[in-house]
Amino acid sequence: MEEIKENEIRILGKDAFTVSSGDVFDNITKPDKNEKKPSPKKGFLWLILIFLLLIVGLVWYFKSNKSEEQVVGMDETVSEGTVVPNDSKALLGTMVDSIAKGYTEIRDTVINDVPLELYIPYNAEVSLYVGKPNKEDKDIILITQAADIRRDNRKIVGSFVYKGELLAKGMSKAGFCAIINGKITISMAENSPLMEEAIEQDGYFFRQFPLVFKEELVENEVRGKYSRRALCERSGEIFVVKTVTDESMHDFAQALLDLGVDNAIYLVGSTAIGWAIDKEDRLMEFGQWKSMNSPYTNFIVWRRK
């Protein structure tokens, strides 16, 4: 038998033969022991991961859309002339140029199923007025009755200061409005130094039922459902609110509170006369003139500057 060289391998069998490792095995690549075949389990796990990511994406998408719907539902403006409050205390009215002609913006909203009308005056000076107002006075952009009139003697209920003159004195109602040097204050107190200041500064002062004081509802013993009105302050913005339907005093005050009002006092409602002039100089009248049955009937009025 032939001797086998170091670079040769003998293949045993029926026909034995010898080959050189350089002739054949040098061209054969041995499998890498570290190389692993793809595992079917790993592919399945990737499919599960992709499926979970898809589910998470869909959940996020639907939650995002729902949040956007809720934000729109609480947005300030729903449609032209309609306002719904939000929690940001943004102005309910419109930013108006200080040199623009004065007018009243009339807006609508529904709070707790209570439909309301908001009357927001712009570029106007506020004061009180006693007697029958002149509807032909085009400088009046907003007017509504202020203090109540007694049924027995037809005089003013509660303290009332008109151009520095004390026309009535009484403390049957804790809410008040003071107008001094063009600045209006709506608050509640049994005794307020602002009444004396109104007398000294030729200002104005009247008392009414408090509805909201420092962002808290004030309960009143007034019963029944009637058309209601209020003088309100919200983040420094002064405006009048009127109900479209007859409401109880409590429900009205709660609606004002939910509107975001900081302070509010009642104004004579029901059939008490009043009107507003909008941006197009259109007259919006409410109430009845026949309700004026006293020479002491008084009003809070905004006149164009």
Image (spheres, rainbow, N blue to C red):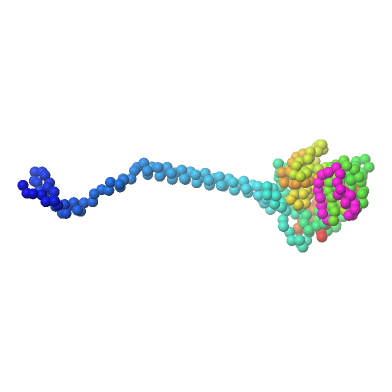
Residue at x 77% of width, y 39% of height: 250
Residue 145 in the image: x percent, y percent? 85, 48
Residue at x 79% of width, y 38% of height: 219
Tell whether position 191 is magenta: yes
Image quadrant containing the C terminus: bottom right
Residue 82 in the image: x percent, y percent? 70, 50
Residue found at the very far front of the displayed protein: 6
Residue 14 in the image: x percent, y percent? 8, 43
Q: Quadrant of residue 252?
A: top right
Tell whether position 98 is magenta: no
Give the side of residue 224 with respect to residue 14, left or right. Answer: right
Q: Can residue 129 be seen in this view?
A: no
Residue 271 in the image: x percent, y percent? 83, 45
What is the magenta range?
A: 182-202
Residue at x 78% of width, y 46% of height: 264
Residue at x 82% of width, y 44% of height: 188
Residue found at the very far bottom of the displayed protein: 99
User: 2 or 115: nearer the eye?
Assistant: 2
Q: How many labels does the image show?
A: 0
Q: Can residue 154 be seen in this view?
A: yes
User: 203 or 98: nearer the eye?
Assistant: 203
Give the side of residue 245 with respect to residue 42, left or right. Answer: right
Residue found at the very far right of the displayed protein: 153
